[in-house]
Amino acid sequence: MVFSSHLFVYYFLPLALAVYYLLPRRARHLGLTLSSYAFYGWANPAFVLIMLASTVVDYLCGLALAGGLGGGPLERLPAAGPRSRAQKLAVAVSVVTNLSLLGFFKYFNFGVDSYNGLVEWLGLGGLAADSVIRVALPLGISFYTFQSMSYTIDVYRGDARALRNFVDFACYVSMFPQLVAGPIVRFSEIADQLRERRHDLGKFARGVAFVSLGLTKKVLLANPCGKVADTLFEAGSVAAAEAWYGVVAYSMQIYFDFSGYSDIAIGLGLMLGFTFAKNFDSPYRAESITDFWRRWHISLSSWLRDYLYKPLGGNRRGRTRTYVNLALVMLLGGLWHGAAWKFVAWGGLHGALLAAERARGKESLYQSLPRAARIALTFLLVGVSWVFFRSADLPSALRYLGAMVGAVGPEPQAALLTGLVYQPYYVATVGLAALIAFAAPQTWDWTRELGPGKVALIVLALWLSLVALNTQAFNPFIYFIF
């Protein structure tokens, strides 16, 4: 089910909120869990079983870590100190189970196709794997496996106390606001809220504001920018100017699409009494690639930092090991986004840029430039990397990059594209999106205080979004495929 759909806006959300608030307080987590399972299983009920399997395994591993499998009292592990063999086994079972689920469903097809491509290239076509199995990717598996896995890791590290109540834990894993495309909510960030949280009109109103502005980002900004990007990236042949226009349009599309989803998720959480962490912090105002990753998809970048980069040694084992760790984390981060070589290239490029900044130091790379130039250079590098992200495959990305620098000339019919992508509506929308991305305050900050003027703007934005939604076809969020 998609947030930007009539089914969700007019039917599912009002019903889910009614069920939640009409139930007694002790039954609300059960009601929210059932609503979330209905939300997730709407397109394919079989996917619910995969999420349930991950949930059961991590719940039992959490009990094992806290010494509660036999029904005894749960103990919070100290932050430092030795762990028993049974505790190490429990966290290993959790990590292996989740990564196995993610690996099979997300990378089976990729592995088979890559192997077949390799043996064909080597002239050994007879060794190709004749697989008739094609695995469907369950929505949101990249998000809920990371989220569920963080529970056992946090309990193992002593950062959180294990849950005895299975419904509470199932509610945490399956909560529909952030289930399909994040943000990745760590258990340690929400553990106290699962036990006790505040519901009031102010928090609910701010949640409505988040949802309204998030829907506006998606419907009024991301979707029109996406029309431009789709036209140019899928044209097959474009001139240099149009190629750069397509990069800017896609940069705006992916930002407003994903930050819009995050706003809606955070807003829905507030409406249910939960406070999720900020997931975007004006990333296109970043002054370096390092700064960009502090601002873009914060829940993922911080997850990779704390659960992968630091355990690998971080920057504590010498300069060479630091560069290797950065490259490895970003390569894996690229693969996390999708099972394709273009995502590996995207992650590798960001890893190389991060390593270069670390090698020379941010000061030596950027200090001599004025702030506007630092921001422009960072946006240029990020935009080039988005070419790999958006293109159909790696060869297509290389051709598009060639068009951007004039190395691949446009075919005569490419001139017809100008009439499609330079329509005043599209040019104005891309321009407005860029203006908001570089100059407007974040939803997180702008909604802290809601006066009459802001409320009027929010109501107008919501009304325009709903009107536009009535004219648009099915438009899932970009990160649904991850």
Image (tube, rainbow, N blue to C red):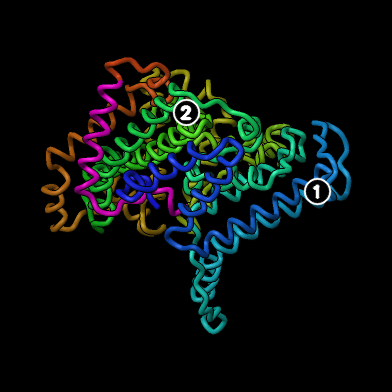
Give the Cα separation between the discs numbered 1 and 2.
Answer: 43 Å
**Residue 302 in view here:** yes
Mark 1 or 2: the one toward you? 1
Residue 266 lies, with reference to residue 140, above or below; the image says above
81 relative position to 374: left or right: right
Location of residue 448 (image quadrant)? top left
429 relative position to 135: left or right: left
Q: Please name the residue shown 82% across and 50% down the image.
A: 69
Residue assigned mark 2: 288
- Secondary element at image label 2: loop
Q: Position of residue 178 (x, y in %)?
A: 49, 42
Q: Position of residue 453 (x, y in %)?
A: 27, 16
Q: Position of residue 143 (x, y in %)?
A: 54, 48
Location of residue 466 (image quadrant)? top left
Extent of the magenta region? 455-482
Identity, as a three-letter code, of the amino acid under mark 2:
Ser
Disc 1 residue crowd, few under 14, some 14–19, many 20+, Cα 10 Å: many
